[in-house]
Amino acid sequence: MLSAESLKKIDYELTKYPADQKQSAVMSALAIAQDEKGWLTTETMDFVAEYLDMPSIAVYEVATFYNMYNLQPIGKYKITVCTNLPCALSGANEAVAHFRERLGIGFNETTTDGKFTLKEGECMGACGDAPVLLVNNKRMCSFMSNDKIDQLLEDLSK
Amino acid sequence: MINFEIDGKPVSVPKNGTVMDGANQLGIYIPHFCYHKKLSIAANCRMCLVQVEKAPKPLPACATPAMEGMKVFTHSGQAVTAQKGVMEFLLINHPLDCPICDQGGECQLQDLAVGYGASSSRYTEAKRVVANKNLGPLISTDMTRCIHCTRCVRFGQEIAGIMELGMAGRGEHAEILAFVGKTVDSELSGNVIDLCPVGALVSKPFRYSARTWELSRRKSISPHCGLGSNLIVQIKQNRVMRVLPRENEEINECWLSDKDRFSYEGLNSEERLTRPMIKQGGVWQECDWQTALEFVANGLKDVKEKYGAESIGALGSAHSTLEELYLLQKLARGLGSASVDHRVRQSDFRADSQMQGAPWLGMPIAEISQLKSLLVIGSTLRKDHPLLAHRIRHAVKHGAQLNVINPIDDDLLTKVRNRAIVAPDKMVSMLAEVLKAVAELKGVEIPDDAKNALSTVSASDTAHAMAASLNDNKPAAVFIGNLAQHHPRYADICKLAQHIAQISDARFGVLGEAANSVGAYIADAIPFGNRNADTAGGRHGGQGANASQMLGMDDPASETGCKAYILLNLEPELDSYNPQRAVKALAAADLVVMMSAYKSHAAIQENYADVLLPIAPFTETSGTFISTEGRVQSFNGVVAPLGETRPAWKVLRVLGNILQLDGFDYETSEQVRADVLPAGNDVSAWLNNSLGSLAVSPIEAGKENKGSEGLQRIGEVPIYQADLIVRRAESLQRTRDAAAPLAWMPGSLMMQLGLRTDEVIRLKQGEGEVRMPVAQDDSLPANCIRVVSAHPSTAALGGMFDQITVEKS
């Protein structure tokens, strides 16, 4: 179901917890699975559940609790823009409007070429750098003016 | 102990006790939803907020540990304001659909809203709506009503042992659901209906059929598994509408298995027999009781004159009451036949002559939770005894080691320390290995009666591990399950297990298959005199034929069946070890009297019965069950008998009178009980698992079955086929546990036979054959095919653990 490489990573996460509490690694296991598959299908969650020896519904609970797990297919790049107050005061709404215009999609939508998905995010703890956004949960971009957004989209489109 | 004060009253609770514990002790009610005494503390409903002196904010009583000298106020201004605030939030998204909600009238939210809710809502925004979920045929959902107390989720995790429900999402988007596309299949699932404090989870079979205030509540006892769960039966207009648990900490706690809870549907089944029926000239006709009883009496007299009294056989199910079984055997013995039995699924009766009393659990049910090591032989615990399995699960959670010897490796939903999944014919040698290992460990000699048999046995690692587990952890117990009791070498299994228990200083118990398994022995519904009964008036005659002999199941060559049968509460084509031969023996008889609450399909179609007498199920008669722990529990009828149905004890009494037998002058069932139990409800003198000096027959070590000729059937009884009532409980029959049977076999065997999954094959035993799809289960032992018994689709087959052949079709 998951590649040997992913399983190796999950096994490494498992070493951080007591052997009889494998389910402690569920969040990292889901993140690793998502990195490989792009999004979490029912089958992927079932697999993780079995791998960690826990009920599949318990995995589903975790996967639905956190926004960063994708339970729907998404584009190649998921752009999550923070819209909380400090970002909003520093131009997040303008950034979002720019994305909408450039990509022709709104929140939770994917461009027709399957490249970009736009998501509304919550505070990322970097209010001083507002407005901030995340690319694929991993890369944070700060001070996102329209120019920088254009630059980002251009880089990613390559 | 921690001493503190609630509402000015002093109270003390043990260390780690909470404010809620103290309040419960004092009888002070603190409103709550998520708190439940049997579940872990979640503290997520916030309804139990109370004021604590010196605490800046109100604290949840259920999760606040009691502290020395603490002063708690449950009804102070601050507490009540907090509780009202919580209630306002709970009601924001709760629909105001009480008039059409099944929970209305028994709803904790409704009750507390009266006490703490405002008269109108300040909330004007849109309420949220949550899609309903399909949780299977037993639980109906209205998820918009859910207040997210998570009791149902915790019940799955902590009691049922399988987390089938969970809370997905967060905040306003949180909802209770089962994993994508799954239903709730636990055999204890019905308890979430009781646990749900609102109308989100309600009973599907009961839905929209009555209001709680229209129902009268009557006490009763479960007629299914040997546990003897206490029931509240709720009735309306002389019809059983619903069954709920009656709390009894020593038996079922506050739980009930789905079988106990939903089987009542079978009581209102279309198949109920309401008038006596006689077959005349091959045609079934309804008649009145007088005609039917005279027909039976004359028939019995004829057979007695023609073939002798010993050709009359009486078979009663152990789901019948003590009184019924007692009168059944009294009738048979009065006629001069000691051929009485209730062990229709048993196949090995070698131990009969050595039995010292009624086999029982060997300990009180409540003590199972305290065990530290167990060996369970031949039982899929959670299907055979769902609540006993919960006790064992509880014990395992607290450190007990569970060891299992069984031919089936179904998930027991608990940790199993050592398991030996062996073919039925290897179970005896596996036990012998454990005995050997225990004896070695203790440095004692193997008892004489098993010594010769064990000479060729050497203990495997698993056997050593099991022996060590039993020996090192105390208290320990060895239990014999249903499957082992049906096993063709039951006597050996029982004897070896007893030795193991004795040497390792463990308790020994036989898990009662039916509600009255113990009672049936005490009522003497056995072909040999219960020797302890000597003191109780010597009510036994000589040795009669056992169930196997009566139904010609023991020896295919001999035609030894009886000429007349009285069947009480039995469907032989489903309830016997070898239905094929049983039906054949019945068909060859001159007279077959069926006392049953149901128009048994097979009895009419297969034409073996001559008379059908409608008798009352447990809800329509008074009676007594003696549970597997030896607890005598009497109950009254909760509704009037349906149509012309009569309680079986009355029918047998009248039959006794017509036949002019002595001692059939009972006025009440209590008088019958007084005859069976002259010393009152203490039956401990009768309870004895010992098998005296029975010698274990030789263990054939290293004998391997090869090829499809030597395939063994594993014919366990499915959970919802075990007795007449549950077979007719519609909703239970739609659960996954009642799915159409498949021929399960390990992949190696499928390969050897060249079979594919889902391929329909022909299974043959004796003269019968059935067609059934193949399914793969690699956990089964080699050369075994798991084909359930007690199911209409396998009734044409033979013995439950006999050889079976497979043919491609």
Image: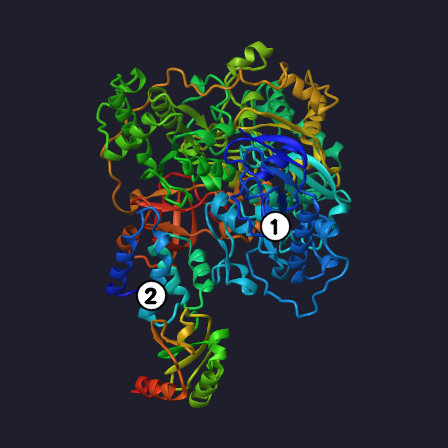
Pointer 1 local density, CA inside 10 Å: few below 14, some 14–19, many at least 20: many
Q: Which structural element holds mark 1?
A: loop
Q: Which structural element holds mark 2?
A: helix
- Left or right of B757? Residue B628 is right
Location of residue B58 with respect to B449 vertically, above or below? below
Q: What amino acid is found at the position of numbered circle 2 in the picture? A: Ala
The percent position of residue A45, horizontal first and vertical second, equals 39, 62
Visible residue check, residue B288: yes
The percent position of residue B23, horizontal first and vertical second, equals 63, 37
Tell me the tag on residue B608. none
B5 or B566, which lies in front?
A: B5
Q: What amino acid is found at the position of numbered circle 1 in the picture? A: Cys
B15 or B521, which lies in front?
A: B15
Q: Which residue is mark 2?
A: A33
B418 or B762, which lies in front?
A: B418
Q: Which residue is mark 1?
A: B196
Q: CA distance from mark 1 to mark 2?
A: 35 Å
